[in-house]
Image (cartoon, grey):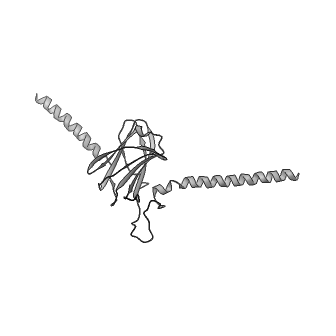
């Protein structure tokens, strides 16, 4: 009987210890003062909203995230009054995605943002860690002269998403112009013969 009691106690402690160890694996991210909204984006992902579950952990507990389709992939919006948060995601299929975490005030002004590339494996809970290559970007205080933290601010991770598209469009226009000049030169040469 004593052996069974020790076995039960050992099993209980190992399960409790595993949960405690898992909780320590979370990467906690500082939430800027004034944050009223947190946006979680899975960019470049081919996942459907019903294939992803997410939890945002804070001092007040965990919040289950509801993802919806967005132009860049999937997005979820929530609130948290915690000074630090940690994000976990789970999917039913394997996916690679850039996970962006954006902190905004009540007017939608971006206060800070961070992102990381994450490989999500089926039926595994994946703690999301901010990339050391893309640390949290904090926008300057609106009290500083000549600065802006409104949603049209052209700095940070979100502003960089259009840079590549703009360069590709300019390159395409340049190639079209060169092609048209070449065709005109060829036609003019053929008509003069």
Q: Residue at x 67, y 55 (%)?
A: 174
Q: Residue at x 41, y 62 (%)?
A: 139
Residue 29 seen in render: yes
Residue 136 shows up from this direction = no
Kindly give the residue lying farthest to the top in the view shown.
1
Q: Residue furthest front?
A: 107
Q: Residue farthest to the right? A: 193
Q: Is residue 10 above or below residue 180?
A: above
Residue 15: percent from the left, percent from the top? 23, 37
Q: How many marks?
A: 0
Extreme residue toward the left, this view: 1
In the rendered image, which quarter is residue 150 located in? bottom left
Place of residue 185 in the rendered image (x, y in percent of width and height, measured from the top left): 79, 54
Q: Position of residue 37 (x, y in %)?
A: 36, 54
Instruction: Please report the residue visible at 40 percent of the width from the left and 35 percent of the height from the top.
Output: 92
Query: How far across and down, in percent of the image, does residue 11 sit?
Result: 20, 34
Q: In the image, what residue occupies the spot 45% across and 42% down?
A: 96
Considering the image in quadrants, where does the N terminus appear?
A: top left
């Amino acid at each position: 009987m004593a052996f069974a009691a020790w076995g039960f106690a050992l099993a209980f402690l190992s399960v409790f210890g595993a949960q405690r160890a898992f909780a320590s694996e979370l990467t906690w991210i500082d939430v800027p003062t004034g944050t009223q909204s947190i946006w979680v984006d899975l960019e470049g992902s081919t996942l459907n909203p019903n294939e992803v579950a997410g939890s945002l952990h804070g001092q007040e507990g965990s919040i289950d995230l509801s993802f919806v389709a967005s132009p860049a992939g999937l997005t979820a919006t929530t609130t948290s009054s915690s000074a630090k948060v940690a994000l976990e995601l789970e999917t039913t299929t394997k996916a690679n995605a850039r996970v962006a975490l954006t902190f905004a005030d009540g007017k939608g002004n971006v206060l800070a943002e961070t992102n990381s590339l994450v490989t999500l494996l089926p039926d595994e809970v994946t703690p999301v860690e901010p990339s050391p290559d893309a640390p949290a970007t904090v926008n300057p205080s609106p009290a500083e002269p000549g600065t802006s933290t409104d949603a049209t601010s052209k700095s940070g991770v979100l502003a960089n998403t259009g840079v590549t598209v703009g360069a590709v469009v300019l390159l395409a226009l340049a190639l079209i112009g060169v092609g048209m000049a070449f065709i005109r030169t060829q036609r003019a040469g053929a008509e003069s013969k």
